[in-house]
Amino acid sequence: MSTTKIMLEKIKSINPKRLNLLAERIAEENNKSVSFVKKDMIKNFLKYKIGYTDYFKGNYINLTKEEKKNYVTSKNYISVLAYLNPKQYRVITLNKLVFNNLFKDYLKREYLDVRRSTEEDIKKFLKNKESVFAKPITDFGGHGISKINVKEITDVQKFKQELLNKKQYLLEEGLKQHKVLNEINPDCVASFRIITIYHNGEVFTFDHVIRIGLDADPALACFDGDMRINEDGTPASGMWDDNGTLYDKHPLTGYEIKKLKKIPYVPEAIAMAKEAATLVPELRYIGWDIAITETGPAIIEGNECPSYGPTQNYMLNPNNKGHLKEIRDIIGEEEFKKIKL
């Protein structure tokens, strides 16, 4: 998709209610009028091609012209992805079955290709399982995922046909997350996001963020809270949602966020992501979503478009200097010049 088309899509997708909410929040925090903030949003959109969400998370109202050059935007991100993740290799993460087959040793769960399975295969897969997840193999962002109670499946033939009709070709065993995270939200497996860059045989990682669902939806979508985590598993920030709301308690369970002192297996999760990244050196820039179970980390999926939102979110990391600078610092100035920004 061209930059122009992406910008047009951004304009079409504007949510006036949310735009106003963010503008009011920025205005209040910076002692500015809402009209001033909105005008500055428009100016930055026209000049840097950033939307109002990026403007908010990046704290653009307080950035200098030179500082803004260090930030990823919707426009330059296309070039970053094109250079670091060539299109011919993206099927590895875009197709969930291709991904699972390649990284099966890191999944820590069973899965099945419905299209290639007999009814007997499906019966065997379902045996002794409380629930399973049915997923489309090329969708993203949690779209099209269904959590299925195995006890409710009375006709396997009909069940298989329903999955095929919905193009939910992937059946996966559910992961049971660690009790530390289950106390916060037992309905949704928290996703630990680790971004890796492969460069000259070495793997580098960025800010590590745990995403915790704020409702009972079993698939993480947009209603989640993010918290930056140190490499030893201790929290490095509070838990914020995309609208800039800081949560003292989980809205569903009432869990007090300050009670979370340490997430287990974080060093192991980082090591797993770094090892997995070496299997696909052609895709140099990947966002790994990892679950933390009672016995260790388990990869949920990998994303060829890792999302720069959390890494540039000033609420999670007030000392952030821009994700584009992070990338440049890793690959070096000479190679960075090859990215056609």
Image (cartoon, rainbow, N blue to C red):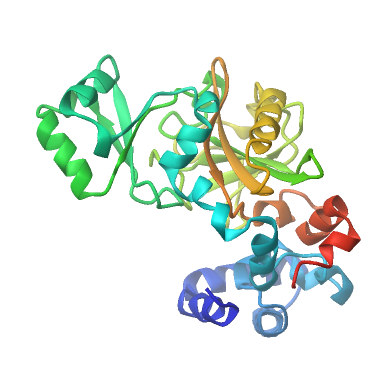
Coordinates of residue 159 in the picture (x, y in percent): 16, 35
Location of residue 309 (image quadrant): bottom right
Location of residue 148 (image quadrant): top left
Side (left or right) of 186 relative to 286 = left
Location of residue 146 (image quadrant): top left
Coordinates of residue 238 in the picture (x, y in percent): 68, 42
Residue at image position (25%, 16%) is: 127
Residue lying furthest front: 88
Q: How many marks?
A: 0
Q: Nearer the viewer, residue 59 or 47?
A: 47
Q: Is residue 33 above or below residue 234?
A: below
Q: Is residue 331 visible?
A: yes
Q: Is residue 215 visible?
A: no
Residue at image position (63%, 36%) is: 279
Q: Quadrant of the C terminus?
A: bottom right
Q: Nearer the viewer, residue 61 or 169?
A: 169
Coordinates of residue 113 in the picture (x, y in percent): 32, 35
